[in-house]
Image (tube, helix red, strand yellow):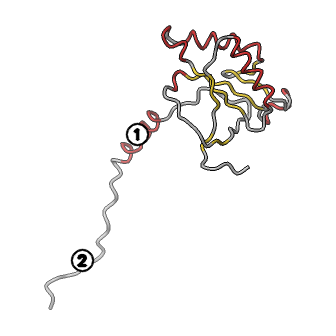
Amino acid sequence: MSKFRKKGNKSQPAVNTAALPDIVFMLLFFFMVTTTMRETTLKVKVVTPKATEVEKLERKSLVSYIYIGEPIKSLQASFGTAPRIQLNDAFATKEDLFQFVEMEKDKRDEAERNLVTWSLKVDQDTKMGIVTEVKQELRKVNALKINYSTKKTDKILD
């Protein structure tokens, strides 16, 4: 005769889901706080070339980007496949660079205007002619601190 009896048909208690909405809201707030929205919508294809000697920029708030490449596939019907310059969210010509440089300098404090770096994000298949024209225009408006955006690699294979 056993002292212990089996309790029959003992059902499992239901899982308490009261904390589930709290966890969902906590995750939602986490992603809302940590996610940054893209500032510029790219209208040109930019696949930056690879480089071995790469330095990271110190203050990204002092960087203005100039994108150069062929228009993305959805815009090729209206703009063609020739490489184009994109400033902020619009296509531009090299003559628009003067106004762009002045606008970007005006956004910054007086002391930081000469510290602005002009970063050229150029597609790896773009010819150097348009890049040289952009550099000449930047030189004319005294925007002399220029860099090229690249991807870091240990070894260049091509």
Disc 1 crowd rating (10 Å Cα; few below 14, some 14-19, many 20+) is few
- Residue at left offset 58%, top offset 30%: 38
Choose the circle earlier in sequence order: 2 or 1: 2
Mark 2 against mark 1, which lies toward the viewer? 1
Query: In which quadrant of the rendered view does residue 79 lie?
Result: top right
| Front residue of this view, candidates 33 and 120 | 120
| Front residue of this view, candidates 134 and 26 | 134
Q: Position of residue 75 (x, y in %)?
A: 80, 30
Q: Amino acid at mark 1?
A: Phe
- Residue at left offset 68%, top offset 30%: 42
Q: Residue furthest bottom?
A: 1
- Residue at left offset 58%, top offset 22%: 117
Q: Are marks 2 and 1 in contact (CB under 8 Å)?
A: no
| Whether residue 100 is situated above or below residue 67 in the rendered picture | above
Query: In which quadrant of the rendered view does residue 90 lie?
Result: top right
Q: Which mark is residue 25?
A: 1
Image side of residue 77 versus residue 151, left or right = right
Q: Which mark is residue 7?
A: 2
